Image (cartoon, helix red, strand yellow):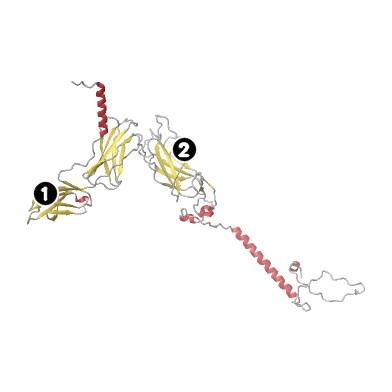
Amino acid sequence: MARPPGPLLQAALLLIAAAAAAAAGPGPCGPAGLSWDTVVRRPGANITLTCQDEGPANVTVSWQVEERGAAGGRSRRLAEGNALLLRQLRYEDSGRYSCYVGGRPLRSLRLLVEEPPETPRVFCYRRSHDKDVLCEWPLRTKPSPGTQAMLWVKRRFTAENATEQRCRYFSKARKFVCRVKVPPGADDTKPLVVSTCVNNGAGGSAGEDRIITLSSVLKPDPPLNVTVEALEKAPQRLRVNWSYPSSWDPRFYWLHFQVRYRPEPAQTFTEVRPPVPPSPGLPPGRATPAPRRPRSPPQVDQVMTTWLDIHDAWRGMRHVVQVRAREEFGHGAWSEWSREAVGTPWTDPRDLTSEMGPFSSQFPVDDGTYGVTLPPELFGEDAANGTDGAVLEASARSVASPYAFLVAGGSLLLGIALFVAIVVRYRQTWRMGRRPGAKPEGEGQHVLVPLAPPSPPHSETPLLFPSVPPAPRALHITNLDYFFSRQ
């Protein structure tokens, strides 16, 4: 006679049974239950429906179809014959097909045109600590009309039954979404097992089980009301403001924020790194709560306020800015980036370089900073035409000063007056040289006239000099006394 099992053995058997029940999960995921007279085909296939194995002689066989979803049992007549051929099936061809002989029904078949469902790849997230968990997965193609999706959730390593949730299909987003109810006071750190199943008349497909915790699936919504404004007399600064998403309650938990920007028309973003992490301040309209645990300091590229200044914006260029958020203790994932907001730094209206267009004079260097300021005139007008990444030709366009025109005009008039004076003086001297007794022109080079004639001997010097007209003097162009002596 066999002994009854001891208490230790009974406990071990119970644990094994519980583990087997937990491993079994919600059950097999197969096709939806179909009746014996149902025929399933995929879209695009051909099918031949037969009324009788042997066609009756001298009898007319007619076909009618009652389309799926038709109200009031409305039917549509089809071709006649013992065999009905349907080509290139569509979802709309699903329905019940019946054949008649002399108005008496002989056979009825249900045709189901469906595509086997895709295997779900589930992604779960929670928008805040007080919201339910949403699990969803996208689809490449639109599912068949009769496709259903189910989700089961249960705690790991327990023998409790799984909670079943029906999923909903959103045609615009082309995805299934399932909502998992979270009871109040649930432990955020206990693991949960999520199972999914999608099936229809053509088959069923089960997704891979996911193990999650309520804290690990936190993913806030993107920040709202992102604005970018210029700061007066700060040509390289922009102030970014935003607000908490409406789904997150900041009275209990805060968010860390991250800002990124890019100057147009650049395609890559730069994450803002504040020089000094600001002290956490209260969000607008928030009452001081009782601290539940120490606050986590933000990282070097994160802030806890709802504003941030960009200190290295490009001068005169339009910037695109985005913001995202994450739970303050680093649980879960970052939110999606917010909608793009644009802004341009302040520009001095007295700056002449601003008339040449919003050209940046900063270039990134290897260490990620910006320096090497160049004059904006080197960039020309090609930068304004959107030549992204192209080599820009230098432009020498400069702003002319009225004083330069005055100096140039005065110098030109003075030169003309001096030239006219020289010509007039030369003509007068030339006319004087044409008097009688003067030497004819063309007898050689200019005669050098000594300043004083040599003194004759005293014996040959007459006491009285005869009256002789003075000889004409030679013209020396380099002697200015000719032009300013009196006649």
Q: Nearer the viewer, residue 414 or 130?
A: 130
Residue plotted at (24% across, 45% down): 116
Rendering coords of residue 475 (x, y %): 75, 71
Give the residue number, with chain letter if any, for mark 1.
107
Is residue 132 at all visible to an observer of this figure?
A: no
The answer to which image quadrant residue 328 occupies is top left
Label whose residue precedes the other's in the sequence (2 or 1): 1
Label 2 to label 1, Cα distance in Å?
76 Å
- Label 2 environment density (alpha carbons within 10 Å; few <14, some 14–19, many ≥20): some
Quarter containing the C terminus: bottom right
Amino acid under label 1?
Arg
Location of residue 402 with respect to 338 vertically, above or below: below
Give the residue number, with chain letter if any, for mark 2.
300
Secondary structure of the residue carrying numbered label 1? strand
Quarter containing the N terminus: top left
Amino acid under label 2?
Val
Rendering coords of residue 38 (x, y %): 16, 46
Q: Nearer the viewer, residue 143 or 132?
A: 143
Location of residue 200 with respect to 163 vertically, above or below: below
Q: Nearer the viewer, residue 5 or 420?
A: 5
Answer left or right for 280 relative to 105: right
Location of residue 93 with respect to 168 vertically, above or below: below
